[in-house]
Image: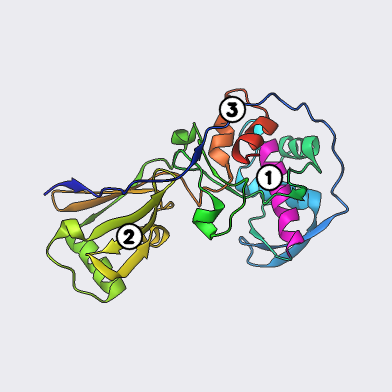
Amino acid sequence: NDFKVEFPEDDTLIYLPEKGSPANFTSTRSIADEYYTVHDEISGSTVTLNGHELLCRMINNEIGDSWGEEAIKAQAVAGYCYLRFNESIGLTPTVGLKSGYSSKLENCVNAVEGQVMYYNGSIINGVYSASTAGYSTSAKDIWGVDYPYLRCVESEYDDQDPNWGLEKQYTKDEVKKMLEDKFSIELSDNVKNWFKVDRVFSVKYIDSLTIDGKDDCKITGNGLCNLVGLKSNALEISYKDGVFTFKSYGWGHGVGLSQWGACNYAKNGWTYDQILTHYYIN
C-alpha cells in the first residue's frame, strides 16, 4: 500500500545559460532624489522613501549583509528594477522594509546604484524569491503573464538552501479530514486515488491536482502547499504505513532571481552581473 504520487510528463522548456564574462560595469548614479511608494508588509503601512534608503531597507529585510558582496549587489539591481517596473505600470509593490542596515550592505548598494536591466528597451520586472526547486519558474506558469526574460533556468546550488526538502507528515485520517472539510465531499477508501497531479512545470512544481478522481474537485499546487503548511508548490507526495509525507523544495514562487542561488553562485566566484544574466535571460 506504500506509494508515491506520480507526475505527468513535464513539457517545460529548460534553459541552461552559459556563464558569461564579467561585464566590469562601474557606472553608477545616485537615486537619492527618486521617490517610490511601497506597501511595507512588516509595518502594514504604505510609505514613500527615496530610492537609496528604500533599496537598502529592502535588501536588509530580504537577505541582510551576511552573504557575499556580489550576491548583495545582484539583489540591489534586481530590487531597483522591481521598483522601477512597478512604477512604470502604476502599481504599488508590497515589500518588507528593515532599518538598521550595515555599512557593508550600503557599500554594495553604492557600487551598483542606478544600474538597471533592460529587455527590448524596457526595464525588466526584476522579481525574485528565496530559492527554487533546482529550476526557476516562468512568469507565465505562475502569474499567467509571459515575460520573455522570466523563463525556467537551472539554479544549480539551490539544494544548499536550508529550506530544501522540508517535510510535513499527516496520518491518513488527518488528510482525509483536511480534504473533506475543504471540499465538502466524502472521500473513497482508495487512498491512492486521493491525489492525482494534473500538470507539473519546472520539473517539481505542481500546477494542479484532481482530488479522488472528481473532475469538479481540484486544488492548485499553491493551495495544497498552504493546506499542508509548506512554502513551495514544488511538492512530492508519498504514502507509507498509513502516513502521508509532503516534501517541498525551494521557498516562494521561484520566478526570476533565486536569492539562495545567487548566494552560492557568488561563493563560487560569479560576479553580480553574471548572476543576473543567468536568471534574467536575453
Q: Is residue 203 above or below residue 275?
A: below
Percent position of residue 7, x then y: 30, 48
Give the residue type that dot 2 points to: Leu
Label 1: few (<14), some or many (≥20) within 10 Å?
many
* First along the sequence among labels 1 and 2: 1
CB of mark 1 within 8 Å of CB of mark 2? no
Give the residue type that dot 1 points to: Ala
- Gap in angstroms between the C-alphas marked 1 and 2: 33 Å
Q: Nearer the viewer, residue 187 or 247?
A: 187
Q: Which residues are magenta?
A: 73-89
Residue 174 shown in magenta: no
- Gap in angstroms between the C-alphas marked 2 and 3: 35 Å
Determine the residue positioned at 24% across, 71% down: 180
Q: Nearer the viewer, residue 38 or 23?
A: 23
Determine the residue positioned at 37% across, 41% down: 165
Secondary structure of the residue carrying tag 3 is loop
In which quadrant of the rendered image does the C terminus lie?
top right
Percent position of residue 279, x then y: 60, 39
Residue depth check, mark 1 versus mark 2: number of the one nearer the observer? 2
- Residue named by callout 3: 18
- Residue named by callout 1: 78
Task: Examine the rendering and report whether any part of residue 69 can be seen.
Answer: no
- Residue named by callout 2: 209
* First along the sequence among labels 2 and 3: 3
- Apparent side of residue 2 relative to residue 209 in the rendered image (left or right): left
